[in-house]
Amino acid sequence: MTPREIAAAYAAKHAPRPQREVDKGTLIGARRRPDGGELRLTRHEYQGRGYYRLAVWDGDWPVKGKQIAIRESELGDITTWLCDVMEAKK
């Protein structure tokens, strides 16, 4: 193999992968944050099961490590807990 062929083979093997599109889901609500980010609640589906994602976004991408997935079966408990917190703050 010539050096040019070796370089072409290397480049083909190590070509950058196209960036995956982020699953933005169905937006339920969004709120700007003082740090310039945005808090978003979205609904998604995975293998036929619904879930919700609460995440901090910076532009077009969710911030790594600042999101949580909530199954539909957990919504009742979480809503109750949030109501308890709101009542305790009165």
Image: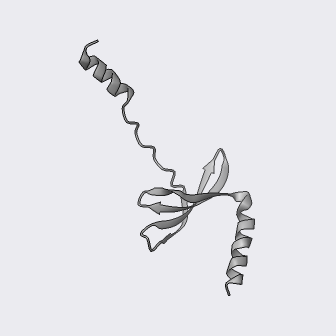
Q: Quadrant of the N terminus?
A: top left
Query: In the rendered view, does 69 fall on the left or right side of 1?
Result: right
24, above or below 88, in the image: above
Q: Nearer the viewer, residue 89 or 21?
A: 89
* Residue 80, quarter of picture: bottom right
Q: Nearer the viewer, residue 12 or 72?
A: 12
55, above or below 9, in the image: below
Residue at the farthest bottom position: 90
| Number of marks present in the image shown | 0
Residue at the farthest top position: 1
Q: Position of residue 67 (x, y in %)?
A: 56, 59
Identify which residue is drawn at 43% across, 70% down.
Answer: 35
Query: In the rendered view, does 22 fall on the left or right side of 53?
Result: left
Q: Nearer the viewer, residue 88 or 61?
A: 88
Query: In the rendered view, does 12 fall on the left or right side of 37?
Result: left
Q: Quadrant of the C terminus?
A: bottom right
Query: In the rendered view, does 8 fall on the left or right side of 34?
Result: left
Residue at the farthest front position: 3
